[in-house]
Image (cartoon, grey):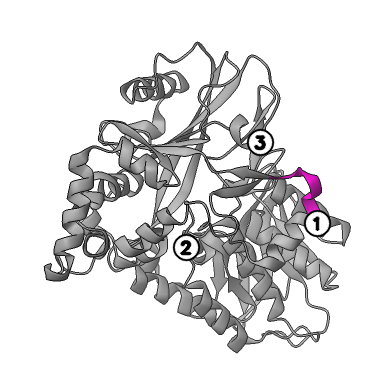
Amino acid sequence: MADTTQPAFVVLGGGPAGLAAAYKLSQCGWKDVAVLERGSRVGGNAGSFVLDGIPVDFGSHRLHPVCPPPVMADIRRLLGDDLLNRPRHGRIRLRGRWVHFPLKPFDLLTRLPASFIGGVAWDAVRKPFTHDPGPPSFASILERGLGRTICRDFYFPYAQKIWGLAPEALDPEQAKRRVSNSSLGKMVRKVLGALPGMKRPGAGRFFYPRHGYGQISDALSAAAASSGARLHLNTNVTGVTVEDGRVRSVEASVDGQTRVFPCTYVLSTIPVSVLARLVRTAGPVAPLDAVRQLQQRSMVLVYLTLDIDQFTEFDAHYFPETAIRISRLSEPKNYSLTVAPGRTVLCAELPCAQDDPEWSMTEEELGALVVRDLETAGLGPVPHVTRVDTRRLPHAYPLYTKGYREAFDAIDHWVGNISGLVTFGRQGLFAHDNTHHTMAMAYALVDCLGTDGSFDHQSWARARKSFEHHVVED
């Protein structure tokens, strides 16, 4: 890409991926690094804010023990004693009953209906004699691996709720990237791993920052800034100028004023479909048909402040049942151990499309919807709600519709032909990845830079190949 010894870097997006890149660039001694973030604070969908004295996140977030050692070492160093080691303590509602999540052998045997356990056992017995249930799809891959009972009671209704599509309409890659226990054998091994003497290191636990998940991004931002990186908040990117096949500058709107950031590299974590529309070039333009094919699932987050110390002892509840509209409920105090006597906050996740009625509901309507769902799930009566707050995420999940891969590859190929333009991270690579995955991407990207400012394309291609093995940890 660049032959200069003093490259200028512009990072698009101030989430964990973009901030990790800025942090590593500044640690490597690169002096001209700017991060452009549209929001008023860093973190993006992995950020935090405070409601009624309680740190809350944009949904339920955890740092998993499988975090790559270099990433974990930096987070530990940056957060110190604020990085809490917490037990996983959630539950899933199946056939009207609650089972612990992560799954535990004794809990499964005593709480699930005999008909469910019998159905799973029968699925296992007949699996060698069962043909693939249909053309390759999310549905066929999972039903072949897990059997009809688990799929029909949990994965299929939950998938339709989260992504808004029938499981048969989702690409097989959705199963590969989103379901770590994609076979009965894997699921049994993971359940048995909860038994004493068989636990893997870190199993059943997670790490969480004392002041909310966004503290990871805050710490990365502060560390990068202390080494010379510049962070620009409330900065809306309006164009990326390409001349002679090479990036030259980024144009952005800052407080109503247009500002130009000359650069050698643009490292983009914003949605790749958005990036494609921002590039200004006299060369080949973005394949707009492919851009239109890449779809995102949106989400409304509904926060209820209750006038009690604690709603339940559980950190998260999962609701696969279609009669319940929300997909997951978390209680942030149970993650961070925040001391806030007499009040707690619940965060309900409501996946939807932006043309669905839920997207435009008022806070009062959304609060009433969540209360109804909780009472339907047997979690009522809900204590007095003193406040309802909402946040809307336009880009919550990439949708792996059939044919999405061809569309992404077309855009990715076009981006790859622009010298100095690199996409990475959850949004940049249209991936479902966890925070530790996206930070590992950033580290790998910076490792591809030579001391002379050149970029090793072959090393980046190998790194990109390794990213395809990422599986989301729930």
Callout 2 environment at 10 Å: few (<14), some (14 to 19), or many (20+)? many
Q: In the rendered structure, which amino acid carries the disc numbered 2?
A: Ala
Residue sitting nearer the eye, 56 or 287 = 56
Which circle marks residue 88 in the picture? Answer: none
Q: Going from the N terminus, do you reach mark 3 or mark 1 first?
A: 1
Lower position in the chain sequence, tag 2 or tag 3: 3
Amino acid carrying mark 1 in the image: Arg
Report which residue position mark 1 lands on.
77
Q: The N terminus appears in which quarter of the rendering?
A: bottom right
Image coordinates for residue 242, horizontal then vertical, percent: 61, 75
Mark 3 near mark 1, Cβ–Cβ under 8 Å?
no
Task: Read off the residue under disc 3.
Answer: 336
Q: Quadrant of residue 11?
A: bottom right
For discs 2 and 3, the disc positioned in front in the rendered view: 3
Amino acid of disc 3: Ser
Q: Nearer the viewer, residue 195 or 383?
A: 195
Which numbered disc covers residue 431?
Answer: 2
| Left or right of 103 on screen, residue 16 | right
Separation of marks 3 and 1 at Cα, in angstroms: 19 Å
Residue interval drawn in magenta:
78-84
In the rendering, at what x and y percent does residue 64 appear? Answer: 58, 54
Q: What residue is at 34 percent from the left and 22 percent from the top?
A: 378
- Comparing 112 with 12, the one in front is 112
404 relative to 445 in the view: left or right: left
Residue sitting at 65 percent across and 74 percent down? 444
Describe the element under mark 1 as helix, strand or loop.
helix
